[in-house]
C-alpha cells in the first residue's frame, strides 16, 4: 500500500512535471467549485422562483464543458509528454475519471435550472421544496468533502461520503414517495410536482457522482479500486 507522503509533489527531476500536475489538480478543483456553485444556484432559482437566475445557471454550463475539455487536454499532455508511472499515473487516471463525474454534476445542475425556469413560468409547485433543499444541502456537502479529500490526498473522508450516499438514496426514496402520494390525492398539480420529482432525482444523482469521486480518491492514494465493492472493503483498504 503506497505511502500517502509519496503522493506529494516536488520529487521529480523536471520542475515542469510538478507544474503540470499542480495545474491539473488546480483546474480540477476549480471545476469542482464551479459545479457545486451551479447546483446551489439552481436550487436557489427553484426555491426563490427566480427564472432569471435559472437562465444564468443554465447558460453557465458552457463554462463547465470548456473546463472539462481543458483538463482532458492537460491530462493527455502529461501522459504523452511526461509518461507518468505509479502514483503520478494514478493521479492522472483518477482526474480523468473524476472530471467526467464533475461534468455530469454540471449537467444535473443545468437540468435543475431548466426545471426552475419552467416552474417560474407556471408557478411554484405546492410540495417538495423543503425536501429539495435538504437533499441539496446533503449532496453539496458530500461534493465539498470529496473535493477536499482530493486536495489533501486523504482517503479517509471518502469512506464517510460512501456511507452518506446510502443515506441520500433513502432520503430521495422517502421524498419521492411523499410527493407521489400527494399527486395521487390531488391531481391538479401533477405537472408541477413531476418537475420537483425530477429535481429530486437530479440531486440524488449528484450524490452518486460525489461518491464516485470519493472512490477515485481512494484509488488515487491507496492504489486499490473500490468501485462496486462493499463499504467495509473500502474501510479495510483505507485502514479506517
Image (cartoon, rainbow, N blue to C red):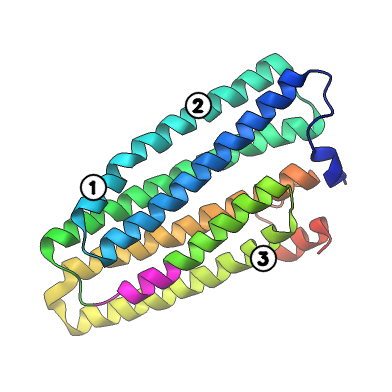
What residue sits right under mark 1 in the picture? 55
Query: Horizontal placement of 131 versus 170: left or right?
Result: left
Chief secondary structure of the magenta span?
A: helix
- Residue drawn at point x = 77 percent, y = 45 percent: 221
Front in this rendered view, residue 41 or 194: 41
| Span of residues in magenta | 127-135
Image quadrant assignment for residue 83: top right
How packed mark 1 is, by other alpha carbons closer than 10 Å (few <14, some 14-19, many 20 or more), is some
- Residue 225 position, x and y percent, is 72, 47
Nearer to us: label 3 or label 1: 1
Measured in 3D between alpha carbons, the distance from the residue under mark 3 to the one under mark 1, in whole angstroms, is: 34 Å
How packed mark 3 is, by other alpha carbons closer than 10 Å (few <14, some 14-19, many 20 or more), is some
44 in the magenta segment: no
Measured in 3D between alpha carbons, the distance from the residue under mark 2 to the one under mark 1, in whole angstroms, is: 24 Å
Find the residue positioned furthest to the top. 81
Residue 70 shows which numbered tag? 2
- Residue 202 position, x and y percent, is 38, 58
Q: Secondary structure at mark 3?
A: helix
Q: Name the image quarter holding the C terminus.
A: bottom right
- Residue drawn at point x = 11 percent, y = 76 percent: 188
Q: Earlier in the sequence, mark 2 or mark 1?
A: 1
What residue sits right under mark 3 in the picture? 160
- Residue drawn at point x = 50 percent, y = 26 percent: 70
Q: Earlier in the sequence, mark 3 or mark 1?
A: 1
Query: Horizontal placement of 136 versus 188: left or right?
Result: right
Counting the numbered discs, the total is 3
Q: Secondary structure at mark 1?
A: helix
Q: Is residue 64 above or below residue 180?
A: above
- Residue 181 position, x and y percent, is 28, 82
Query: Horizontal placement of 23 versus 188: left or right?
Result: right
Amino acid at each position: 500500500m503506497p505511502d500517502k507522503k509519496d503522493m506529494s509533489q516536488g520529487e521529480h527531476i523536471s520542475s515542469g512535471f510538478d507544474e503540470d500536475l499542480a495545474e491539473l489538480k488546480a483546474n480540477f478543483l476549480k471545476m469542482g467549485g464551479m459545479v457545486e456553485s451551479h447546483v446551489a444556484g439552481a436550487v436557489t432559482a427553484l426555491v426563490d422562483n427566480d427564472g432569471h437566475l435559472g437562465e444564468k445557471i443554465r447558460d453557465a454550463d458552457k463554462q463547465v464543458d470548456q473546463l472539462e475539455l481543458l483538463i482532458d487536454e492537460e491530462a493527455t499532455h502529461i501522459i504523452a509528454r511526461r509518461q507518468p508511472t505509479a502514483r503520478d499515473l494514478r493521479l492522472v487516471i483518477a482526474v480523468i475519471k473524476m472530471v467526467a463525474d464533475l461534468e455530469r454534476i454540471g449537467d444535473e445542475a443545468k437540468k435543475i435550472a431548466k426545471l426552475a425556469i419552467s416552474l417560474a413560468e407556471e408557478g411554484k409547485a405546492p410540495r417538495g421544496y423543503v425536501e429539495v433543499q435538504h437533499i441539496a444541502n446533503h449532496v453539496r456537502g458530500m461534493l465539498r468533502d470529496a473535493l477536499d479529500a482530493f486536495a489533501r490526498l486523504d482517503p479517509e473522508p471518502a469512506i464517510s461520503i460512501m456511507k452518506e450516499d446510502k443515506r441520500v438514496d433513502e432520503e430521495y426514496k422517502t421524498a419521492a414517495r411523499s410527493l407521489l402520494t400527494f399527486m395521487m390525492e390531488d391531481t391538479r398539480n401533477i405537472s408541477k410536482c413531476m418537475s420537483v420529482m425530477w429535481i429530486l432525482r437530479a440531486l440524488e444523482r449528484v450524490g452518486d457522482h460525489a461518491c464516485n469521486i470519493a472512490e477515485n480518491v481512494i484509488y488515487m492514494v491507496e492504489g486499490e479500486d473500490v468501485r462496486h465493492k462493499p463499504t467495509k472493503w473500502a474501510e479495510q483498504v483505507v485502514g479506517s
